Amino acid sequence: MAIQSMVTRKDYAGRLWGPNQRVTVDEALTIATINGAYASSEEHLKGSIAAGKLADFVMLEQDPHTADPDQIKNIRVNRTVVGGKTMYRGRVEGRRRTQFSARCSGPRPGVPAPSAHSETPRKTRQVWQ
């Protein structure tokens, strides 16, 4: 919903808020990925897919650039990759898939949260080679 709201400036109920503040899909994706990593001083580790960064991203059923802006929130996630490992695989059915970087900021289902007493340091997570 966040990407859709940035592009359309509509809330979940369809109410328009500050239409002069709309951004493009590219700008919304940059805000949600690279800018988010920068805001938490982690741009060296996440926010884009590059060598040496965490291999976390999603593959979408449809390219949000070509989707109806009011339907972006309904684009299905076909795959979620965390640390280079597929954590979720949805329906594929031969549809075109588009890849975008998306690093979660909180706990993720199926991924144990790092602990200060963890025997496996976070640096062992797979990164892009």
Image: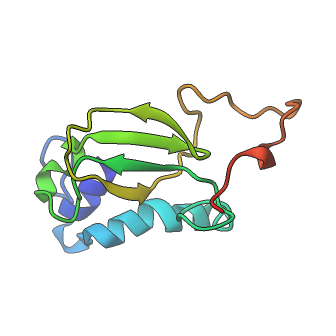
Q: What is the quadrant of residue 54 in the picture? A: bottom right
x, y percent for residue 36: 53, 61
Quadrant, the C terminus = bottom right
Describe residue 5's horizontal placement relative to residue 115 as left or right. left
Write the residue at 58% across / 47% down: 84
Total of numbered circles in the picture? 0
x, y percent for residue 58: 41, 48
Between 4 and 109, the residue placed more toward the observer is 109
x, y percent for residue 116: 86, 34
How are the colours assigned in the image? rainbow
Q: What is the quadrant of residue 65 in the picture? A: bottom left
Q: What is the quadrant of residue 120 in the picture? A: top right
In the rendered image, the residue lying farthest to the front is 94
Write the residue at 32% across / 41% down: 77
x, y percent for residue 76: 26, 40
Write the residue at 21% across / 48% down: 11
Between 26 and 54, the residue placed more toward the observer is 54
Describe residue 109's horizontal placement relative to residue 10 as left or right. right
Write the residue at 48% across / 61% down: 33
Compared to 120, does 65 lie above or below?
A: below
Describe residue 36's horizontal placement relative to residue 9 as left or right. right
